Image: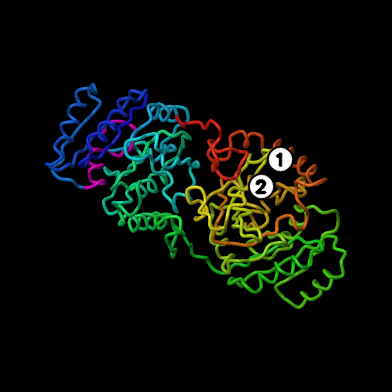
Amino acid sequence: MVTFSILAPLYNTPEPFLRESIQSVLNQTYEKWELCLADGSDREHAYVEAICKEYLEKSGGRIRYQKLLRNGGISANTNEALKMARGEYIGLFDHDDILHPSALYEYAKAVNEQGADYLYCDETTFHKGDLNKMLTLHFKPDFAPDNLRANNYICHFSVFSRELLDDREVFRAKYDGSQDHDMILRLTARASRIVHIPRILYYWRSHSGSVASGIEAKTYAIEAAKGAVAESLRGQGFEHFRLSSTKAFETIFRIQYQVLGEPLVSIVIANQDHAEDLKRCVASILEKSTYSHYEILIVENNSTTAQIREYYASLQENEKIRILTYEGAFNYSAVNNLGVSEARGRYVLLLNNDTEVITANWMEELLMYAQREDVGAVGCKLYYADRTIQHAGVVIGLGAHRSAGHTHYRQHWKNLGYMGRLCYAQNVTAVTGACLMVKKQLYEEVGGLEEEFAVSLNDVDFCLKLRERKLLNVFTPFAELYHAESASRGSDGEGGNAARYGREAERFREKWKDVLEKGDPYYNPNFSLDRSDFSLKNAPCGVT
């Protein structure tokens, strides 16, 4: 059985908060633990030492205490606590927070059954001393490296194998204020099995002076967080990137990676008639895009109007544009596969004919992720004409058909999203084929879009094939377009389209049955699959 060493740096902790924190460890149903208390409190708070020694006698030797000669801050005090630790696994615990009684049991189970070497759980922030006054419920995704770089979503309750430490320090003092983000970035980069336990097992107390009450309490944390993320990025080979705070929060970042070279991007647009939609789409690309090294391949499929023929003729003189012809009944996958086969670019960008560019540097924002070796597909943020959200990432299992659905659907464009998710680039299981960039080589290696999914779910299926290769799919909110969804083919919920979608959804569920049963790793199982707004299930697991 694994032994957990829980490190708690103390400094002038209010008596009721300290007692509740220590008692929450004593209440653990899993008993192989030790609590290492490093006390940097001043003379005016000598009661902290007295309380610790009182509990020391009650713990049966499982509480270890050291009075420090001086207060070194969170990082130094935690590192002093580490010197007392004898367990195989280290847990980090704030001196005024509370653990759920089953926290260590759940962690021990994950270690024993899954070989976890880094673990974290869901958490809640509560007001002062009342657990019934929860301010936020943070239900997290499984490990997502792009999320973590932009936002320390992991936070509490971090527990990790001692073997992940490369020296005798947990925290580095130069990143005080964001020492946990720095530590998580470093240790998850070394971990081989990161496990997220989707239960609220950590209660983060919000009170005056705590980071939980607002970043204003520790403004230096902003620069510390930027420094930690920058060092992590450089350590993983990234250069010439830019970090900036987002509107969600000062320590939630936009990361702009360097676009390497100027590779050719082949934009593939399937089209049948709909001259006005296509004109608007192409004009927005030509007039607004700041990236210039691209070609547009329009794949014509069974158009009949004179208007579209006239428009095609007008495009003949533009050397960036080629018109291809797909003969046969409409099959979105087959049409796009033909376009990609004729593409000259190293990167292909599938684009619906009913989209319109908003963000001038949209291609750069997609390309900076598509260039990475660990990334498969990259998708953008799409709006309806009324500026409500049409696409901000796809979750498998979501919706009435339990196939796939879009998160934050129909939310206002100014919405920050659940825990700020509409404000930073992140890992998702899938992105929509209405605007999807990928390396041409990858597209071909996985067989392109599956033609058995003639109209729907071909993009999600494609993204799952990329994920089978251990590649990350990325949604970025910094590439924005309008999308008049279904303007070309009609709604999936109407007439014969509904029946067709039902058949394709059934085939999708059969093909990806095992994946669907496991659930979407980036969508917490506490969330309802009937809604796209991160609403909780009626009886969410872990809320106890």
Residue at 74% of width from left, 39% of height from top? 507
- What residue occupies the far bottom of the structure in this picture? 317
Q: Is residue 165 above or below residue 431?
A: above
Q: Secondary structure at mark 1?
A: helix
Name the amino acid, label 1: Phe
Q: Is residue 76 left or right of residue 258?
A: left
Q: Nearer the viewer, residue 70 or 437?
A: 70
Image location (x, y in percent) of residue 291: 59, 70
Q: Secondary structure at mark 2?
A: helix
Crowding at mark 2 (Cα within 10 Å: few <14, some 14-19, many 20+): many
Q: Residue at x 82, y 63 (%)?
A: 273
Locate residue 419 relative to residue 176 in the image: left or right: right
Q: Nearer the viewer, residue 231 or 311?
A: 311
Which segment is the magenta one?
73-95
Quadrant into which the N terminus falls: top left
Q: Is residue 129 above or below residue 247?
A: above
Which residue is found at the position 82% from the left and 69% from the top? 308
Residue contact at pointers 2 and 1, CB within 8 angstroms = yes
Q: Any magenta on residue 90?
A: yes
Residue 338 appears in the picture as rendered: yes
Q: In this image, 148 relative to 514: left or right?
A: left
Q: Earlier in the sequence, mark 2 or mark 1?
A: 2
Residue 146: tell me if it is visible. no
Q: Residues within 10 Å of mark 1 (few under 14, many from 20)?
A: many
Q: Which mark is residue 508?
A: 1
State which quarter of the image contains the C terminus.
top left
Q: Identify the residue position indicated by label 2 in the image.
A: 460
Percent from the top left, x then y, of residue 159?
A: 37, 36
